[in-house]
Amino acid sequence: MLQSELNRRQFLKESALGAGILAPAILRGAGSEQKWRIGTFRFDVTPPMGHSLCGGWIKPVEGVDDPLEAIGYVLLGAGQPIVVCVVDWTGLLNAAHLEWRQALAAAADTTIDRVTVHCVHQHNAPFACLDAEGIVEKQGDLPHIVEPGFFDACLRSARQSVAHARHNTRSITHIASAQNAVHKVAANRRIIGLDGKLVSQRGSSSRSLHHRRYPEGLIDPMLKTVAFYDGDEKVVASHFYACHPMSYYGDGRVSADFCGLARRLKQAAEPDCVHLYFNGCGGNIGAGKYNDGSKEMRQVLRDRMLQSILGAETQLEPEAIESVNWHTTDIHPPLNEAIDEVALMEQISNRSLPVVARNRPSYALAWLHRVRAGIPITLSALHVNRVSLLHLPAESFVEYQLRAQASAPDRFVACAAYGDGGPWYIPTAEAYPQEGYAVSVAWCSPKMDPMLSRGIRLLLTV
């Protein structure tokens, strides 16, 4: 069973407090007569020495190259407070994701449906699933998925930081949006052959000439920036780009990696504005075409990201805020029929297998329990004038991002994926018969495609 105190009934009840039934209704914020205020927060989420990284199947923490952060804001004036947060972790899944949202909601004096939490998906970072942790802990010989004491300490910091932000706000009067191409970072990971099957996968890094000579394939080349202003002073800037954010990992050295480092450089250059970085729908996107995995390439990729951020910001043209609205809809993703509880438990308990072959199935088993418990995934969108910030789950394929933008051509749509990571990968329906790694660790069936697509349409056509 799920380790969270939020069972299905409690979750729906808490989500709906003061706002009517959440699923599948869409919640609306207040109108343009409101005055809007924002409070920002940031706190450290760097794991301690010896803590598991990426679910326990790579080297644990031996040192810290650069710290990990959780960064976000509390937005007031559109009904109950809205909380947006992004974390330098590999993922937050199932009960872990719900508990983060619950903690932030309580600290901001709002309901859980008005909180969105995302991960950047660096791999030398925690991959937090409390449900999987409970499963492997019973084995007695497996490393932690996430250490409960560390997880609870991060939630204490979250509550303190968000409560402070809730009561220390400033006005926001204007919004601006822009986009700029990122050069020589992203490429589609999946190379498909004449038989329609996956021939090879370009990972986050590769030294294969075979991988380098193929074109980038289907990506979203644009980094999108959305900024809030108080008069002519920029207060918060959010940057969105779809790509696995790893240059290299597995050496036990904690790092926010090239995307986090680019964000940090921009933050240092503009300390009066809080900068956030969100990974878009990058489930099938990585840097393997351009990245050979060397340490030198981390700085190269960092600088390419930073240049794109700087280029986008030169195009920002603030306009007065006229409307702020928050919309949500719930989905109940379908379970991948290939998931077999008995087979998973046999694999998890087989002590002759390597850790990765035992820890990874615990995530699938946790998802099976989640689906059986009927706990939904919440999709949400923040609409400010004609700008839409779309909040999506897990490792969604880039097609969902491109479809979202195409379905609302009159809006500036920026996608943040890697929210609730419970489903792991979310391929398109067409990708399943192509096979490959992403399909093998997609805990939902192909029916997830029309379900997620319908949810996106609901959020963008209100």
Image: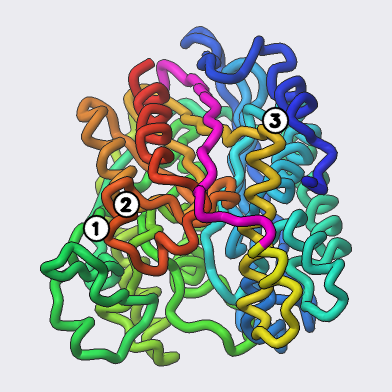
> Disc 1, disc 2: CB below 8 Å?
yes
* Residue at x-position 57% and y-position 52%: 421
Residue 325 falls left or right of residue 168: left
The Cα atoms of the two marked residues, 1 and 2, are separated by 7 Å
**Mark 1 Cα-neighbour bin, 10 Å: few <14, some 14–19, many ≥20:** many
**Amino acid found under the numbered disc labelled 2:** Val
| Discs 3/2, front | 2
Residue located at (59% from left, 89% from top): 251
Q: CA distance from mark 1 to mark 3?
A: 32 Å
Quadrant of the frame with the C terminus:
top left
Q: Is residue 312 visible?
A: yes
Indicate which disc residue 112 carries: 3
Q: CA distance from mark 3 to mark 2?
A: 27 Å
Who comes first in sequence, dot 3 or dot 2? Answer: 3
Q: Secondary structure at mark 1?
A: loop
Sequence-wise, the earlier of marks 1 and 3 is 3
Marking on residue 386:
none
The quarter of the displayed image where residue 309 is located: bottom left
Which callout, 1 or 2, points at the residue further toward the start of the chain?
Answer: 1
Which residue, given by chain and number where applicable, does mark 2 sit on?
398
Magenta-tinted stretch: 320-342
Query: Residue 384 colored magenta?
Result: no
Q: Kindly identify which residue carries mark 1.
A: 219
Q: Is residue 442 above or below residue 59?
A: above
Disc 3 residue type (three-letter): Ile
